[in-house]
Image (cartoon, helix red, strand yellow):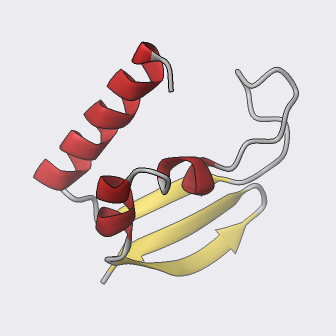
């Protein structure tokens, strides 16, 4: 993981640990902006970090709309 990636993941984890959101919306569509036309799975990527994986255990799938999944804090 590059220094930039580590900074971004660390910042995200710190923020959600301080103030866990009630809802989380994850973009699931292919070809997300900023990824050079490649498919990217945000949850799979972030879940490699044990702190994020622990945080994510408190969320449950709520619904899906085109290109997005919505999760709710239990």
Question: In the depicted view, which residue is nearer to us: 63 or 46?
Answer: 46
**Residue 58 point in image, percent of width and height:** 31, 77
Q: Residue at x 68, y 50 (%)?
A: 41
Residue extending furthest toward the top = 3
Please say if 13 is above or below 24: above
Location of residue 66 by image quarter: bottom right
Question: Which residue is at the far left?
Answer: 18
Is residue 22 toward the left or the right of residue 56 in the image? left
Q: Position of residue 52 (x, y in %)?
A: 35, 55
Question: What residue is shown at x 82% (from left), y 41% (from top)?
Answer: 39
Residue lying at the far front in this picture: please name it: 1
Residue 6, horizontal then vertical, whole percent = 39, 27
**15 vs 1, nearest the viewer:** 1
The residue lying at 36 percent from left, 76 percent from top is 57
Quadrant housing the C terminus: bottom left
Asked where in the image residue 31 lies, by quadrant, the reply is: top right
In the displayed structure, would residue 62 be above or below residue 52? below
Q: Nearer the viewer, residue 16 or 69?
A: 16
- Which picture quadrant has residue 33? top right
Count of numbered circles on the image: 0
Q: Residue at x 22, y 59 (%)?
A: 20
Q: Would you place residue 19 above or below residue 36 in this image? A: below
Viewer-proximal residue among 24 and 51:
51
């Amino acid at each position: 993981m590059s220094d930039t990636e580590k900074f971004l993941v660390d910042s995200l984890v710190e923020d959600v640990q301080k103030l866990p959101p009630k809802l989380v919306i994850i973009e699931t569509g292919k070809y997300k902006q900023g990824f050079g036309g490649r498919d990217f799975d945000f949850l799979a990527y972030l879940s490699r970090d044990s702190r994020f994986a622990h945080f994510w255990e408190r969320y449950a799938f709520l619904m899906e709309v085109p290109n997005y999944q919505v999760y709710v804090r239990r």
